[in-house]
Amino acid sequence: MDRSILEGDPHTVIEGMLIGGRAIGANMGYVYVRAEYPIAVERLKAAIEQAREYGLLGKDILGSGFDFDLEIRIGAGAFVCGEETALLNSIEGKRGEPRPKPSFPFENGLFGAPTIINNVETLASIPPILLNGGDWYAGFGTEQAKGTKVFALAGDIVNTGIVEVPIGMPIGEIIFRIGGGMQNDKKFKAAQIGGPSGGCITEDNLNAPTDYESLTLLGAIMGSGGLISMNEETCMVDTARYFMEFIQEESCGKCLACRVGTKRMLEILENITQGRGEEGDIELLEELGNTIKDTAMCGLGQTAPNPVLSTIRYFRKEYEEHIRNKYCRASVCADLFISPCENTCPANVNIPGYLSLIATGRFMDAYNLIRQENPLPAICGRICTRPCEGRCRRGSVDEPVAICDLKRFVADYAFKNEPAYVHDVVFPRNGKSVAIVGAGASGLTCGYYLSRIGYEVDIYEAEAVAGGVLAFGIPEYRLPSDVLQHEVNTILKEGVHLHLNTTVGKDIEFRDVRNGHDAVYIATGTQFPQRVNIPGENLKGIIHGVTFLKNVKLYKSINLEGQTVAVIGGGNTAIDSARSALRLGAAKVIVLYRRTAEAMPAYRQEVEEALHEGVEIMELVKPVRFISDKHGSVAKVECIRCETGQFDNRGRREIKDIPNSNFFVDIDVVIPAVSQYADLPFIPRGEIGVTKWGTFIIDEDTYMTTEEGVFAGGDVARGPDEVIRAISDGKNAAISIDLYLGGEGKLNKGQEIDIPLLEDDDEIISHERFEKEILPLEDRHSFEEVIRGYHKLNAIAEAMRCLHCNRR
């Protein structure tokens, strides 16, 4: 920021220093500039010469009897010279290191003379303040901090650069309104403010004002005004290591606290990011940091621990994951994972491995490699939200590899070539049994892995088909029933016993299930629709999303021919309901969403397909009342328009009603699809701990509930979530159950598969994704599957786009 002022308007700084010299009786001024800023030095020199020519510098300025001149001193760029006494030493030609205090510079400063030090931004503000008056300048800022502040916006935001804002403007306003928000629709994670020795601001504090006191309370500082925005792909432990490395290298070494303390902190952080972290490291970092803050000689040393202490304060969980689980959720610390895509996949599928197998034409081996970690590849290949692709390094070149579509390709290939597929030998029965309540993705996965290591597994399912929400909550055009049934059958072949039409708590008591087995895994999901709780919700013609999709897929009992349908919500259930309504003959389908379309939690490709098919999205509107016709059926939805406000504690914009903006939408059918919840009627209230949302309280590491021997996972434990996470929970729960029952916690994943080492191309040629077959728009009148997948040749070509960053 200071460099831009010197380059763009050096006369402002000269004038500010001249006024300052006149005010305090100083006759000499020095501008200390880094040698790395040659343009700033060149323009400042020219401006000083111009000022001298006009008689604004030198002897007897404008006949006033006041003498004042300026001199430029070029420094080597040492960070420590930002400390005022180190700066003075550097100007005097000495080593740039701080002086003991007292005495202070205003008593004994440069060359022993009383000296006042200010930075460029402050001095450049003096002329406009005198020109416009103090009241004008005090009109900006807060009661305690007047004026403006210049910030340098950098990092993962759309608009980088330098901005001047009133002191106190909320951090979120600077990042999202001026900075344009995060690049590539990534989620905001944190902002580093105050330079290398500043601190982190999280999404919880986006409404915090940028004044000195507020930032200090959050563990940050205003500092030089650097504001680095970081997205969800940032590892906060590695970020702390990066800043500590810089600070340690820039330490002048004069005091022991900074010289040795920052070195020890850096060593600990390096160990953590390289998988060598130990219990107690976090506490040791906190102790060292607080000691350095209290004992370091200068401001640099005293603020040096800020990046570490603030990241521990707000992201302690990430430190714990690095140390205990050797896991970096941001896929940055390369020593902790195979590849970013594998690390991001909740099921930890070896993605580079199966891409290599596809590239060499070994499709069955690729299928078997996937099933080692995920027994439902055909399902995930169709409906997964693709977190792995969000971390694919190929995305920095052109487009991420179509990891999910390639998974679907090999699963479909395996189904067509079943005679060639031989099941692995399962372990002999160990005499112990496990009951699973719910035959959804999580329950099926848990049963699959437990059966393969010798357990008798009984799965109790209330519906007439297995699959849970997969069976009735995902439309046929996205997940055909025969694909689901085929995957279920492959699991049943492992010896799992499936009891359909068996409701625990009705057909069989939970206590009988518990007493008849050595352990229980509950994976009933969140299958009950959440009400929107506005007047008229019980009118005829209003059917909630989950119920609507179930009636469509299982019972084929819905007819919307020629009707106008309103869908309320922005998640996958809402979009699935809207697209299904069109296929059922609806003349018009409108999605009413209280936020902007870009903020919809539904998978982006599904939203785009919905728009392509003719669904209308009405954003920033909130239904407030359902109005009936004379027959008691819903006829209108009264809505109110909304606008975005401040940020909530999840980093999203709060939504505010616009007064007197009510309007009406004429409709025939309404499908509220705002969320789902878990209902556990088979467990007496208070017997097993549940949250206020109706989900189970579980141990994060073992998945055990508050009752001994009863485990839970998937949506019933974490709320509505992705299918791949339910699969991951089922697999991890199988490990925990085996350990609980005296096993080794080692799953039978099948025979080891030899993965070919492909030739590494030095030159990367840009090429977007290869095309897959898609049902034409004019043929989408039925529930025929829309995405048809890859042809074999395109699948091989797409797999060859992988950069194999696991080897780079």
Image (spheres, rainbow, N blue to C red):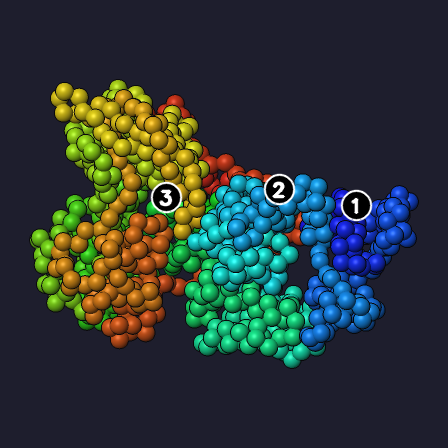
Q: Mark 2 and mark 1: span between their CA atoms?
A: 22 Å
Residue 500 appears in the rendering: yes
Crowd band around label 2 with a 10 angstrom C-alpha radius: few (<14), some (14–19), many (20+): few
At 53% from the left and 74% from the top, the residue drawn is 290
Under circle 3, the secondary element is helix
At 87% from the left and 55% from the top, the residue drawn is 67
Residue located beneath label 3 in the image: 383
Is residue 576 shown above or below 417?
above
Where in the figure is residue 798, as x and y percent of width and height? 52, 44
Under circle 1, the secondary element is helix
Under circle 2, the secondary element is helix
Where in the figure is residue 616, as x and y percent of width and height? 37, 27
Residue located beneath label 2 in the image: 136
The earlier-in-sequence mark between 1 and 3 is 1
Q: Nearer the viewer, residue 548 or 207?
A: 207
Q: Nearer the viewer, mark 3 or mark 2?
A: 2
Q: Amino acid at mark 1?
A: His
Crowd band around label 3 with a 10 angstrom C-alpha radius: few (<14), some (14–19), many (20+): many
Q: Mark 3 and mark 2: span between their CA atoms?
A: 58 Å
Is residue 64 shown above or below 426?
above
Residue located beneath label 1 in the image: 11
Q: Amino acid at mark 3?
A: Ile
